[in-house]
Amino acid sequence: MSNYQHLTFSVDNSIGHLTLNRPNKKNAINDALCLEIEQVFINMPKDVSVILFSGNGPEFCSGLDLSEHTAREPFEVVVHSRMWHRVFSHISNSGIPIVAALHGAVIGGGLELAICAHVRVSDETTFYRLPEGRHGIFVGGGASVRVAQTIGHGRMTEMMLTGRTLNAADGERLGLAHYVVPKGTAMEKAQELAETIATNSRLSNWAMASGLARINNMASDDGLFTESLLTGITQTSGEVKERIDAFLNRKKSS
């Protein structure tokens, strides 16, 4: 297990386990935690095929650590926000599928963090909120793009204006989570999904985890061209032939 102050990271059978570890702060995000997340991805072992992402304690992540919030000049705020963007992009764009196990609070920056995961499992205790508007500020960790793309800008505008809380069922309905499971079982379900994803071709996992979001941001013709490139890269690997042959032989013998 790697030595970090605000999180833990270990690898078991090619699955990386990344856990926010500030339970006394409800896993609130400060700069040190952000930079540790970045270091995990910079130093990612080559044998990691999937990452299981979770939070230690009763909450996944309660958002920005306001106790460490400092007054900044406008340009300093811009630079700080861009640091969050850089760090969170490691999660969404590393090419490694990320499965998040959510429970309790997924608020503000915690939602911006969680939405970077490619597969999200919540348990029944999970709740979501974007309180920035009520604090007199604006989101700065990517929600205006990633959350708005997930639930629509109208829904996000309403969440920010009112500060409303969405429960686990609301979150699944709107796409903030892909699964809702009984209390205390999000990690179990996330582990099951991570193990399934780990059996995929690494190349196709890379294409899905890094390609689809980029295609979504492209003009249609550019997206279709990129799709063809990814198809060419993935379908011509030796592993694909082995997998298809195995599938066809299994069908013949059944």
Image: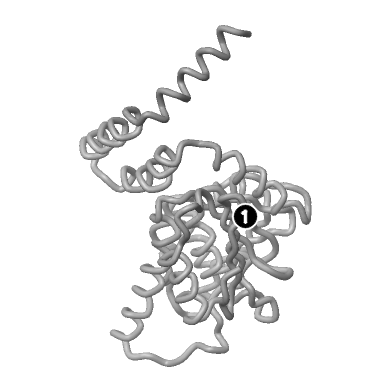
SS class of the residue under badge 1? strand
Q: What residue did someone put label 1 on?
A: 12
Residue at left 45%, top 78%?
A: 137
Q: What quarter of the picture does the C terminus occupy?
A: top right
Q: Residue furthest right?
A: 183
Residue 168 position within the rendered picture, expressed as x and y whole percent measured from the top left: 67, 53
Residue at left 50%, top 66%?
A: 160
Tell me the quarter of the picture where residue 198 sits. Answer: top right
Given residues 136 and 54, the one toward you in this image is 54
Q: Residues within 10 Å of mark 1 (few under 14, many from 20)?
A: few
Q: What quarter of the picture does the N terminus occupy?
A: bottom right
Specify the color scheme.
Answer: one colour
Residue 97 position within the rendered picture, expressed as x and y whole percent measured from the top left: 49, 49
Residue 171 position within the rendered picture, expressed as x and y whole percent measured from the top left: 61, 52
Residue at left 34%, top 28%?
A: 235
Given residues 211 and 9, the one toward you in this image is 9
Given residues 139 and 226, the one toward you in this image is 226
**Relative side of 162 to 220, left or right:** right
Residue at left 52%, top 52%?
A: 98
Callout 1 amino acid: Asp
